Image (cartoon, rainbow, N blue to C red):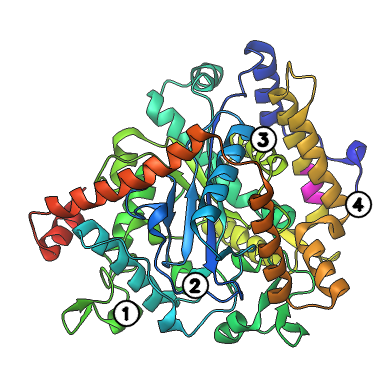
Amino acid sequence: MQDWSEIVLLSKTFEQRMNKLAAASPSDVMGGGLIGIEKESLRVQPDGYLSARPHPESLGSALTNRFITTDFSEALLEFITPSFSSTWEALRFLCDIHQFSYDAMGDELLWATSMPCRVPEEREIPLAYYGESNVGRMKTIYRNGLGYRYGRTMQTIAGVHFNYSLPTTFWPIYKEMEQSRSAEDEFRSDAYLGLVRNFQRFGWLVLYLFGASPAICKSFGEGAGPDMESLNGETLYEPFGTSLRMSDLGYSNRTQARLDISLNNLNEYIGDLDKAMMTPEPLFQAIGLKEDGEYRQLSVNQLQIENEYYSPIRPKRVAFSGERPTAALTRGGIEYVEIRSLDINIFDPVGINQNVMRFMEAFLIYCLLKESPPFGKESKDETVQNHLATAKRGRDPAIGLLRNGKSVSLFDWAMEILRDVRSVAELIDQGDEKDVYVNAVEAQLQLVSDSELTPSARLLAELRGADTSFFEFALACAQGHKQYFADLVPLPVERQEEFAGEAADSIRRQREIEASDAIGLEEYLERWFALE
């Protein structure tokens, strides 16, 4: 293992950019970027089995509530924070959503890990229901299609999504620094795509540092048929695994691996997604579009909609009502990025903490400032192999990753990256005596120095130490988290009223949408797919 003094110097372009930003910019040029969190959690019965109850009415409409919705299943809650300029505000809001939701859920629990609880047979996993409007029915049909294509069990995997945009004041400074003559939207989109490519290159580090799914309940694993070791009678695991959620057991699947979605140019990215939505896929044609007049999926093409394409990171723009994601990108370019590779941390009651959020912010800025050459097939294949290797055996002391066709130690490469990310953290911390971003990076350095400190290693140590199964330990943690929120002081009146008011208003908005439908579902879908 190398120490700081032995690590390769900062790359030339990255170092030049950092020096210019430090010398020519306001001290807070890197501070104040917008952060938003989306956190998924399965609702489970007190005994730890998947809930069969409908979405609680006291949580409002899953179709229109801005803060609390569902993902694939009626039992898979998704909590959404607004965008905040500080990690504390985002974390506080997420904590408040949990507290409000627990109060509304009665005796049910929120499952404490990304990998599911004991799940029933495929067809018994309930699809999310969004009412009888055209848009609501479309959302359910889409999920039905996901179930046919990839299996309902796989869709019960949960995660944390980290949304981030650099501060608006950063862009004119950076554009002038780069001496770019491009239009503002084009410059920003190109820079964000560079970030996206680099996150693909270096995102294996996120799996190593924050992966928290090295083990699974056999009720999940037996359906997938993985070649894994048994930790005990109820638990399968990978001895050096970090994030089975992000492995070929979870969100990495062979069908989508064949898609070639460009990340080198925004128009190419949009064009490739549109092409995938129009290209028939034989495996999905075999499923069929309808059965007895009922939709099985939205289409038989490679993608039903853009969001079906799974990637650890997505370039995004807030869309208008009824606007497709690619249309929003065409309209105004990339506005922010969505990181989708964070596991739920079983050791945090809300699944994420401030240190992780601060590190992610610094890491994403590093990915933007670091040189980011266009992807060719070989370099893109390397990123996929590195992600899978880290997900399955990232803590193996002998693990090597591919860098430009050559094998390099994961741990040595991680130290190089952290050196650069630390310099970004120093710039963010300028003027703040507490050095909270530097401290967040230093905390991750400890995890590289000692892999036993990672969440994945800690989870396996807990299972072995208590001689318990993944299911039993996760259930005990879920019960503990419920008690944690029960012991907190009640929510402030204004926050309670905000969530309760949004729940009531969301039900009203759903009813208005349902009452306003003037065309049938067939025509609605035809019009939607005709949108550009």
> Pointer 2 and pointer 4: residues touching (CB < 8 Å)?
no
Q: Are marks 4 and 1 in contact (CB under 8 Å)?
A: no
How far apart are labels 3 and 2 at the CA level?
38 Å
**Front-most of 107 and 234?**
107
Q: Which residues are magenta?
A: 412-416
Q: Nearer the viewer, residue 489 or 307?
A: 489
Which corner quadrant of the image does residue 382 belong to?
A: bottom right
Residue type pointed to by label 2: Ser
Residue drawn where x is 28% and y is 72% of the image: 297
Q: Position of residue 178 (x, y in %)?
A: 54, 22
Q: Left or right of 311: which side holds 329? A: left
The CA span between labels 3 and 1 is 43 Å
Badge 4 crowding class, 10 Å Cα cut-off, few under 14, some 14 to 19, many 20 or more, is few
Element class at badge 2: loop
Residue lying furthest left: 518
* Camera-nearest residue between 138 and 20: 138
Residue that label 2 marks: 51
Residue behind mark 4: 1
Q: Is 275 placed above or below 426 here? A: below
Identify residue for label 3.
362
Whether residue 470 sits left or right of residue 50 in the image: it is right
Q: Nearer the viewer, mark 2 or mark 1?
A: 2
Disc 3, disc 2: CB below 8 Å? no
Residue to which mark 1 is pinned: 282
